[in-house]
Image (spheres, rainbow, N blue to C red):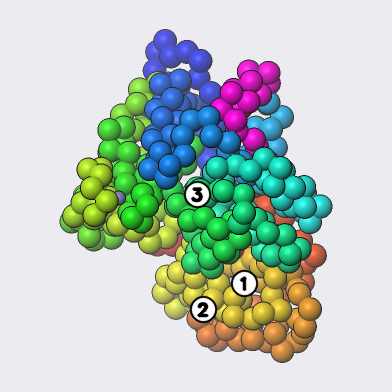
Amino acid sequence: MVREGARHLVQSNTGGSSGEPLVFFLGRERVSHDVAAKWRATRWWDVDIGDPEIVLWGSPIELGAQDRVRLLRDRLLRTELLPAFDMSVHSMDRFLARIRARRPRMLFGYPSSLALLAGHARQRGIAMDDLGVRVAFVTSESLYPHQREAIEGCFGCPVANGYGGRDAGFVAHACPAGSLHLTAEDIVVECIGADGQPVQSGERGEIVITHLRSADFPFLRYRTGDVGRLADAPCRCGRGLAVLEAIEGRSTDFVVAADGTVVHGLALIYILRAIPSVGEFRIVQESLDTTLVQVVPLEGFDNTAENLIIEGVRERLGRDVMVSVERCSQLPREASGKFRYVQSRVPVQ
Ligand SMILES: [Zn+2]
C-alpha cells in the first residue's frame, strides 16, 4: 500500500489486542499534520509550543530509539518523557519527583497511567496541585469518570480527553467547553452502521476515518472498531470544527454475556470500584464461560470481597460463568504502557 517514491517512512503497528496487529507506515507530511493538530488543541487550553510538558508514555522500543535528534527536539520543545510501561512504586516516586522539579504546564499520557500516578501521590501524601499545571491531556484509552476525578483532584487541573491513535491520527480533542472537536481539515470522520453506510448525526455507529494527509500510506475509510456518535450542532465554545458527541466505547471495552448480550466493560468495572479493599484490577474474559479477575489487594481484602466480585460478575455475565479471582502484587502494563481494565477474547458480533 506504500505510494511509489515515498521516502522517509516510519514503520508502526497497532497493538493487536483485538486481533492481528496492523503494520503501517507514516510519512513526514502525515506526522507533521498530526503534531500540528495536537499543538492547536493545546492552545485551546492556554498551553503553547515551548511550554514545559511531561509525557507519561511510550513503548520500550520507542525509548530505545531515542537518538540525538530526538533528544534535541524534546529539549527544544521542552518535553520530557517518562516511561508509562514501568509503573512500579519505585518508578512512580521518581516520576512525582520529576514532575515537581519540572513544574510542567501540561501533562500528557494514558488516563490509566496518570490516574495511577495520582492515586500514588495521594497515598504518599505528596501535593501536586501547586505546580501550575494547566491541563492533563489523555488519549488512547477510554477515560473513566473515576480517573478524571483522580487526575483533576491530584494535579488541580482539568482533564482534556482526546481521541485518536498512531494509526487513525489526531482525530478529535476536547475544548474547555468539553466537546471533542474533530481535526476536520485533515481527517474525514464517519460513523457507519452495520450496512457500511453512514448513520444520521446523533446515531451510534462504528467510527471510520479517512486521513487526507496520508498519501504515502493511505488510510481510506479505515475502520477503527470504536463506536461513537457525531453531533449535529456546533459547540457552544464558538469553534467551528464539528463535534464528536461521544465515544461510546472502544471495541476492546466490551464483554459478552453467556446469552450473547454485549455488555459495556464499565458494568464490571463498577463492581470492583465499589470494593474499597481492591487496588488495581484487570478483568479478562477468556471465553463465554470463563472470566479471570486479577486484583492487587489492599488492606482488608478477604474472601467476602472475593465473593462479591464473583457474584457481581456472574450477575452480569450469567449464573454459570466460571469466575476466578487472582491476587497479584502488581499488574503489568502492555509493552506500549497502555493498560486495559477489561479485556475480552470473545469477539463482539
Ligand atoms: Zn468547543
Q: What residue type is labelled 2?
A: Leu
Q: Which is more foreground, mark 1 or mark 3?
A: 3
Residue 48 in the image, given as x and y percentages of width and height:
46, 34
- How much space separates mark 2 and mark 1, taking CA atoms? 9 Å
Could you tell which of marks 3 and 2 lies nearer the N-terminus? 3
Q: What residue type is labelled 1?
A: Thr
Q: Which amino acid does label 3 sit on?
A: Val
Q: Which residue is drawn at 31% across and 29% down?
A: 212
Q: Helix or strand or loop: what does disc 1 sit on?
A: strand
* Label 2 within 8 A of ligand 1 by Cβ: no
* Label 1 sits on residue: 291
User: Residue 70 lies in magenta, yes or no?
Assistant: yes
Quadrant position of residue 259 = bottom left
The answer to the question of whether label 2 and label 1 lie on touching residues, with beta carbons closer than 8 A, is yes
Which quadrant is home to the N terminus? top left
Q: Nearer the viewer, residue 79 or 87?
A: 79
* Label 3 sits on residue: 135
Does 251 sit left or right of 115 as displayed? Answer: left
Q: Residue 317 carries which label?
A: 2
Q: Helix or strand or loop: what does disc 2 sit on?
A: helix
- How much space separates mark 3 and mark 2, taking CA atoms? 38 Å
Residue 223 seen in the current view: no
Residue 56 seen in the current view: yes
Could you tell which of marks 1 and 3 lies nearer the N-terminus? 3
Q: Residue at x 45, y 69 (%)?
A: 264
